[in-house]
Image (cartoon, coloured by chain):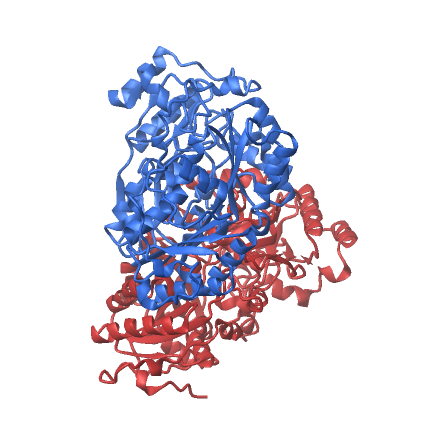
Chain colours: A blue, B red
Amino acid sequence: MAIRFRSSFRLLSRHASLRAQTLNRTATLGARACISTSSPTHFAVAPHGEIEFTADKFPHMKRNSAFKKLSDEDIAYFRTILAPSGITQDKEDLQVFNSDWLRKYRGQSKLVLKPASTEQVSKILRYCHDNKLAVVPQGGNTGLVGGGVPVFDEIVVSMANMNSVRSFDKVSGALVCDAGSILEVLDKYLEERGYIMPLDLGAKGSCHIGGNVSTNAGGLRLLRYGSLHGTVLGLEVVLPDGTILDNLSTLRKDNTGYDLKQLFIGSEGTLGIVTGVSILAPKRSKAINVALLGLNTFDQVQSAFKRSKDELCEILSAFEFWDQAAIKLVKEHLVAGANDPLESEHRFYVLIETSGSNKEHDDEKLNQYLEGLLTDDVVQDGVVAQDATQIQKLWAIREGIPEACSKAGAVYKYDISMPVPVLYQAVEDMQDYLTKNGAFGEGKLFSSVIGYGHVGDGNLHLNVAASDYSPEAVDLMEPYVFEWTAKHAGSISAEHGLGVSKNNHLHYSKSPSMIHLMKRFKSLIDPQGIMNPYKYLPDN
Amino acid sequence: MAIRFRSSFRLLSRHASLRAQTLNRTATLGARACISTSSPTHFAVAPHGEIEFTADKFPHMKRNSAFKKLSDEDIAYFRTILAPSGITQDKEDLQVFNSDWLRKYRGQSKLVLKPASTEQVSKILRYCHDNKLAVVPQGGNTGLVGGGVPVFDEIVVSMANMNSVRSFDKVSGALVCDAGSILEVLDKYLEERGYIMPLDLGAKGSCHIGGNVSTNAGGLRLLRYGSLHGTVLGLEVVLPDGTILDNLSTLRKDNTGYDLKQLFIGSEGTLGIVTGVSILAPKRSKAINVALLGLNTFDQVQSAFKRSKDELCEILSAFEFWDQAAIKLVKEHLVAGANDPLESEHRFYVLIETSGSNKEHDDEKLNQYLEGLLTDDVVQDGVVAQDATQIQKLWAIREGIPEACSKAGAVYKYDISMPVPVLYQAVEDMQDYLTKNGAFGEGKLFSSVIGYGHVGDGNLHLNVAASDYSPEAVDLMEPYVFEWTAKHAGSISAEHGLGVSKNNHLHYSKSPSMIHLMKRFKSLIDPQGIMNPYKYLPDN
């Protein structure tokens, strides 16, 4: 099915005036909630053969012998607190909990527990704490760094059975829900009430809000609504010893003591299990516009970004970019719904979304902005979606990139942030570096270096496609990529987290005194070290 | 000087159509930065006689005998690390550091240190830690809960000499500065560069950004730009043992380990001293509108608020309210620049500010919104500022309320947050309660109960004017007001903090397990308990 855009907006036709009547192209944001083409569950069954055990892949990792091995008595105890459906021991059934959708990590857990209440989570953790049984909390298992899957025989505590909305305040927009609620389900719930979740990401059809909080997910709306550190109003957390921290405040302001919830946002399940989330939902915008632009240089991308901050300002809700390598992969792997509507290929693509309360005003602002870019030769081509379907289709390109990358074979995903001016240099330098080392090109170890991400947040997703996952590939790219990032005052994990893949690289982004204090907090809250071991913090 | 508004906008004249040409009333936001009528420094010299010592006012407070008393050797050591001007021992000079502008708290410090660098702060704290000398970090000393002044003989570490901008990134808006930088100075610095500080409060002419961070100040822009937990990108903090936590990130996204900085936001100097702040400044809006409305009931205030979220949405930047008792005080005490432009007095007042990138669009949105309120009898009267001066004058009323209250005599200030529907009930219930107890009215202990605050944040400033500060007055109102707040699922401190006045009431807003964990964090980071003792956390 071809996407049709009004040809009068094709920016290549520079003599066509951009008349207001051609700009009747808004749609409700609700339309976007239907997209889940890039939902990770689509890839879990990809026919790549057996996944290597994490423990084999990282031979330096050793099972902590202080942890107890699961016994029949343990199972018997869990049977006294959970319904039969809350306990999974079947080898086949365990597979999906033991591995990630990128097929990079595989654990050896023998037991998955699915508590149905905060009290059950508390009982599970208290027992594990008392008996030194290691635990991995798991949400929608859509993570990219192996944080939510076991390494050895840790017990998986899946939050899938805790997925109710607890309350919603129509005046303030405060939503309180179970941690296992699926992001997209929550967004639909809010849509019916005129509100929107302040975060959105490709995995929305599978990921849990508790997992989002635990990894401090960024995503597509951060530019507009800010990070979870600002939008989360309260959390209910079960500490490793079973203590329930009941801090599900729905207040926008509450200066009563240390803001403990903040420590659990982004702690990747190493300090306890988030069981409930209170989050401030903004009003859903009545008008949405999405434009796709083709540009020649990353300088032009930056210029378009700077001008969007000035001219679109309060209605700007996304400023995403990707490169030619990314669009090639999307086309090659025919990602569902993701067709490039531009006439020719460009070195860079920018997707701009505006959302506001007045369609005519937004149209006028966007029109002026785009006209300015055209006049000043900042963009070479572009289209503006005319309706909700076209909005979906433009977003499908951006959201289809991770899927396209994964279909390319093995893909190494780096998620780094840095000052915007050097954002794309990271991609070019990586390709140069691999070429110089004779590892890039046809028949070589690496076939493609892809750059895309959130320009507005200084966040680059640097993906390197390889023929296969191998220690040689990793040794070539790491620590090179982390050193590059540190040299450019960046972060080695912008929004994906540390998990099992970056814990020992933390020093590239954090000082010894910071890491030391983190370890002291970890010891204070989880003295037995049972929560999500072998991850997050450096081994030594 | 009378404020003149175009009469065509007077909403009482319901037949006058609100034509677009009457709405030429935008001005740059910069204009507002000039207002500092309510700067606390104006009141510090109010002729109220000598302030009672905090230790006498709260006789249950005892000096912790584990703390060392200041000796000549200590002074000699500090002389080796600080310039002579960085050490204050003069009794007269000490006064201003020993007391607060509300004249409610007074300490007995014999020494004020003014470090000029992070290294000096580190040396001071390490020495105090090693020698068990208690310390009070102090910013602009504009706090309302006694958090920044000593109780006994703690050493005051004033941040006044650390006030430089360290860097500013024009692309991202990331500002890095010393903790002693004055909020208004930073806002002016940013104004020249097209940006704005994401927070604003009445004390802006005196308060330090480090103090703002340490108290998690809310203020007038929180509705639009969110809390400091979202806008602060990084902090440099000196821990009690002298360790420097160098986490001055300028990245919008950085998921590398526990977000330690969050713990210091709102910790009121009990965990260390904030020496540097990195904060994300939004683009300064090109167009500002301010309207003042008169309303009959708090239901109408709520209705106007709900509609503003829908209709002004992304351009809404403030929604403040006050009651008739507040305007009476402002008029009575002739607060500079604060003249009520409405024809008659109203039970409720609302100040609405919009800020956006396109003046015509904003005018149209506000016009439609106000017309709707008028048509539906939601408001009784109103004016819209026509220029920057008028904008200032409208804001001067709102910002003059604290000053007017302080001139009324003794004023007890409660800063509570709760669901918006019960916001004003707190005021009514308090007045009823005091009346029933025979303590309210002419010749009685209490003369006035005033309500004002940030409707958009569910944050009420409940002020009770009394003839004098007295234990009887406190005993009558407390714990009544805290119990009321807890019963309505509110917070006993929305944005002012706990300080010395609310630490023992923390249990009204936080559970025992939360308080227990807070105390464990405190012990971990400040095992000697030297940082800002006698405050914040409950005594037992």
Q: Does residue A46 sit above or below B471 in this rendering?
A: above
- Across and down, in percent, residue A362 comes to 36, 63
Q: Residue at x 43, y 29 (%)?
A: A102
Q: Is residue B207 above or below residue B324?
A: above
Q: Residue furthest top?
A: A72
The tally of labels here is 0
Q: Position of residue A414 (x, y in %)?
A: 52, 36
Residue A275 vertical position relative to residue B423 in the rendered view, above or below: above
Q: Where is residue A513 drawn, in percent x and y?
A: 63, 38
Can residue B499 be seen here? The reply is no
Q: Quadrant of residue A238?
A: top left
Q: Position of residue A208 (x, y in %)?
A: 35, 37
- Front-most of A447 and B472? A447
Farthest residue toward the left?
B376
Instruction: Specify the quadrant of the image occupied by residue B467.
Output: bottom left
Q: Is residue A486 visible?
A: yes
The front one of B239 and A487 is A487
Rendered position, A28 above or below A365: above
Side (left or right) of B362 relative to A152:
left
Nearest the viewer among B21 and B48 is B21
In-image side of A435 versus A249 (left or right):
right
Residue B67, image quadrant: top right
